[in-house]
Amino acid sequence: MIQSPRVRFAAFVLASIASLLPSCASGDAGMDRSDARPNILIIYGDDVGYADVSAYGGEIRTPNIDALAADGRLFTRAHASSATCTPSRYSLLTGRYPFRNDRAEILPGDAPLLIEPGSLTLPSHLASNGYETAVVGKWHLGLGEGAIDWNHEVKPGPLEIGFGMSYLIPATNDRVPCVYLDGHHVENLDPADPLRVSYEEKIGDWATGTENPDACRYPADRQHSGTIVNGISRIGWQDGGASALWVDEAMADRFTGRAIEFIEQREAADEPWFLFFSLHQPHVPRLPNQRFLGTSGFGLRGDAIVEADWCVGQLTAALDRLGAREDTLVIFTSDNGPVMNDGYNDGALRDRGTHDPSGRYRGGKYTLWEGGTRVPFIVNWPGTVGSGTSDALICQVDLLATLGRVGGAPLSAGARRSTDSLDLADALVGQRGAGRRELVTQGVGGLAIQDDTWKYIAPNPARASFGRGHWSVQKHEGSGNPLGSPAIGAGASLFDLTGDPAEADDVAADHPAIAARMRARLEAILAREGTAP
């Protein structure tokens, strides 16, 4: 059988990884750029819990995601960097732990761009190696430089940090403005009906959830009771821009269509590409297309996950149709753990039945427990990545260095030292399972550090105690950075993840020397610019 150039390159990558394993952490060895490079597709779920994927034992059926796992590698100890979305996305794209940036918190809808234009990012690094790059879907990493005028160019944004194409919602689907941003411009905006946005006070005369709760499809808390769009009250207030408003139920089709269009264009040009496909499901408000209603058996949240799985199936079917499947490395993962009634009473807790989105792990979104950051992580590259399960400790912060090597562009020594991103290509696509020795994760209220056995949660008075099955908490914005480094001292927690993966038994008092060692290691990491060798 004749192999495509990228399949031949895949064999080269594996041979390179095997021969360079001792220097893999340094990344000094180069790769032959004359060979074709694999396409890279990251599919990033929004609040998808560890067990929200049936391949991980969940009750919601996700056949298309499961198919990626069936002939790919399923990781059981993969983590997002943070238990909330903006910090995780920042970390994935920059290769830096989010606590290194004081602004890397849950951003309001009108926040300035979080990532400095011109800085090292995953898309900019791949673009410098000949990749065409794109982001489609949810953004929530800030836009502009403050005081955005949505009626003109909105910049800087994704196009200024390495993406060649962007089509997205500016923040989240529960925040105004409820419009699509195509490159630098709001799509379908009528100049005669200018768009205004406020996060300080109500503007205009559009109905709000506070004043007109009966006009909403389901109840919302005070924070989510701003301007009503498509029957759902949102965070913040919007006036004008009626021609540009999105329809939530059509969002999955819109994003998937634009993503496939990008893939088709790049395949026609025979160019390697990187696509960051950022799903909005099952983030609130949950309004899946009507063809998915009732399909999960677990209410609107379950139906939204089924819709997300459909998106995955559409993308992989397009790769098959274009003959690009063996040329494409696909990663499916999520920005943080699950949450139920996150500002809206849409019946998520009532309808979940026996489905446990975090599986055997404690907590979910916002929390420092494993359920907050341990997420599904599946790597699929037919003909290159063998099928199976890996217990290697990995994190999304490592994708910058890892995908740089897989894409033929290992990070320079200088670039590595300013990041926390480790080259784990041997764990992702090679034959060995070595992962991280240690990992720092972040939640609302503090930080945690873990190694192959122990997990130490640094003390912080804001840290709430969440038990399994309870993932509904109130978010608070505008009060400084709730995810900043906590004071390290008495009152820490220590768990033996090997014997107690559910973090039910705090053994800090029984192992003071281990707790002290983990504390000292966390302090050392906080004091450094980066942790990559």
Image (cartoon, helix red, strand yellow):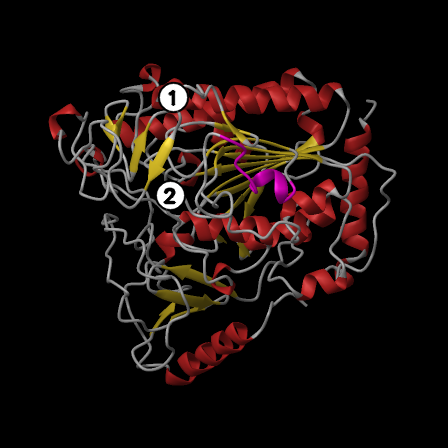
| Residue 193: assigned label | 1
Q: Earlier in the sequence, mark 1 or mark 2?
A: 2
Label 1 with label 2: CB-CB less than 8 Å: no
Measuring from the top left, give residue 391's x and y in whole percent: 52, 53
Dot 2 surroundings within 10 Å: few (below 14), some, or many (20 or more)?
A: many
Q: Which residues are magenta?
A: 152-162
Give the residue displayed 39% in from the left and 29% down from the top.
195
Q: Secondary structure at mark 2?
A: loop
In the shown orientation, is residue 31 left or right of residue 84? right
Quarter assignment of residue 457? bottom left
Foreground residue among 134 and 274: 134
Image position of 177 with respect to 454: above or below: above
Measuring from the top left, give residue 216's x and y in whole percent: 18, 26
Give the residue displayed 16% in from the left and 24% down from the top.
215
In the rendered image, which residue does mark 2 sit on? Answer: 49
Foreground residue among 489 and 53: 489
Quarter assignment of residue 51? top left
Foreground residue among 350 and 257: 257
Quarter assignment of residue 533? bottom right
Image position of 114 with respect to 201: above or below: below
Give the residue type that dot 1 points to: Asp
Can residue 76 be seen from the camera position used here? no
- Badge count: 2
In the shown orientation, is residue 371 left or right of residue 398? left
Give the residue type that dot 2 points to: Gly
Q: For the residues marked 1 and 2, what is the alpha-carbon distance in whole angstroms?
A: 40 Å
If the image is split into quadrants, where does the N terminus sit? top right
